[in-house]
Image: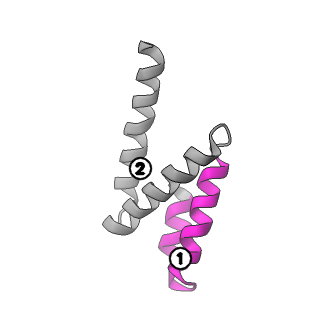
């Protein structure tokens, strides 16, 4: 979430938003190196949520719910 707010929220004042999105998605995917392609897809989804709502908290909450889902699936399976 930090990268999304910094790389999109702040830097889009100075550089085109698509470059900010690209950097944000790459950083997000690299932080999920066990599943880089899935991290890339989720990074794109969370970034579009951020851009659509203009709020990092929505993206953060969605990411948290996703993580909870993954943990519960792991426990229950």
Q: Which residue is mark 1?
A: 18
Question: What range is drawn magenta here?
Answer: 3-31
Q: Is 69 rendered above or below residue 61?
A: above
Q: Nearer the viewer, mark 1 or mark 2?
A: 1
Label 1 environment density (alpha carbons within 10 Å; few <14, some 14–19, many ≥20): few
Q: Residue furthest bottom?
A: 14
State left or right for residue 3 relative to residue 51: right
Q: Earlier in the sequence, mark 1 or mark 2?
A: 1
In the image, residue 32 sits, relative to residue 48, either above or below, namely above
The residue beneath circle 2 is 60
Indicate the secondary structure of the residue bearing disc 1.
Answer: helix
**Magenta part, dominant SS:** helix
Which residue is rendered at x = 57% and y = 60% of the image? 25
Q: Quadrant of residue 24?
A: bottom right
Secondary structure of the residue carrying numbered label 2? helix
Specify whether residue 77 is painted magenta: no
On residue 5, the disc is none
Asked if 28 appears above or below 18 in the picture, the reply is above
Q: Residue at x 53, y 76 (%)?
A: 18
The number of numbered badges drawn on the structure is: 2
- Residue 3 image offset from top left, x and y in percent: 57, 60
**At 31% from the left edge and 65% from the top edge, which residue is drawn?**
53
Answer with left or right where residue 37 lies relative to residue 49. Answer: right
| Residue 70 on image: x %, y % | 45, 29
Q: Position of residue 37 (x, y in %)?
A: 61, 47
Is residue 23 or residue 11 the one in the foreground?
Answer: 23
């Amino acid at each position: 979430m930090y990268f999304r707010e910094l790389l999109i929220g702040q830097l889009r004042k100075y550089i085109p938003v698509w470059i900010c999105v690209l950097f944000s998605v790459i950083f997000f995917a690299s932080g999920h190196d066990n599943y880089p392609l899935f991290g890339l897809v989720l990074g794109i989804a969370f970034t579009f949520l951020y851009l659509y709502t203009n709020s990092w908290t929505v993206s953060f909450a969605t990411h948290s719910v996703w993580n909870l889902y993954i943990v519960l699936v792991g426990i229950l399976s």
